[in-house]
Amino acid sequence: MFKNKGFSLIEMIMVVIIVGLLASIAVPNYRKMLERSKYAQAKNNLQSMRNALTDYYTENDVFTDNITDLETQINADFSDNNDWHYGVAAVATFATLTYTITATRQRGYIAAAGHTILNIDQNGVFSGAYYANAP
């Protein structure tokens, strides 16, 4: 007697549904994980730029708003990539020395949601409208 070997159409459809459900859970979590890593990279870069700006001021008695000067100061590369654009706004008066270094998200999952800016000031305080857990 001949015995059927193989999968029925119902079994195949069930497998496709299960794989689809697993993918619908995994893909958003994967995208969030990528955004968190890019956020951490931006925070590290901002902290490095803050240290470089402090060193630059110590050596030159003036702040710079040129990213290239900061890159030279600590031998790093903060050039614009597809993820972040960096900028420095420095104000030095007789009484105060203030600056803000900004990372602006250029594209990606979070940039599409409008959560795109991360700042650090002269005190090392982070601020901005960047939310790495946005859906």
Image (spheres, helix red, strand yellow):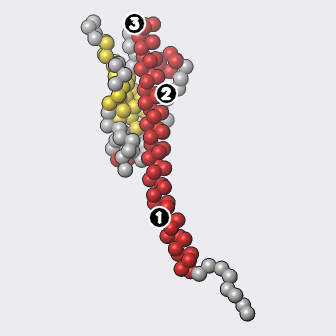
Question: CA separation, marks 1 and 2?
Answer: 40 Å
On-image quarter of the N terminus: bottom right
Answer with left or right where residue 17 lies relative to residue 61. Answer: right
Q: Do labels 3 and 1 touch, CB within 8 Å? A: no
Residue 6 image position (x, y, % from top left): 65, 79
State whether residue 121 appears in this view: yes
Question: CA separation, marks 3 and 2?
Answer: 23 Å
**Identity of the residue drawn at 32% across and 33% down:** 128
Badge 2 is on which residue? 78
**Label 2 secondary element:** loop
* Position above or below: 125 against 64: below
State whether residue 67 appears in this view: no
- Of labels 3 and 1, earlier in sequence is 1
Residue closest to the eye, 7 or 65: 7
Badge 1 is on which residue? 21
**Identity of the residue drawn at 31% across and 12% down:** 97
User: Which amino acid type corresponds to the residue marked 3 in the rendered image?
Assistant: Asp
Mark 3 or 1: the one toward you = 1
Image disc number at residue 61: 3
* Position above or below: 45 against 11: above
User: Which amino acid type corresponds to the residue marked 2 in the rendered image?
Assistant: Phe
**Label 1 secondary element:** helix
Answer with left or right where residue 89 lies relative to residue 51. Answer: left
Question: CA separation, marks 3 and 1?
Answer: 59 Å
Residue 106 image position (x, y, % from top left): 42, 39
Q: Residues within 10 Å of mark 3 (few under 14, many from 20)?
A: few
**Identity of the residue drawn at 46% across and 27% down:** 45
**Identity of the residue drawn at 44% across and 18% down:** 51
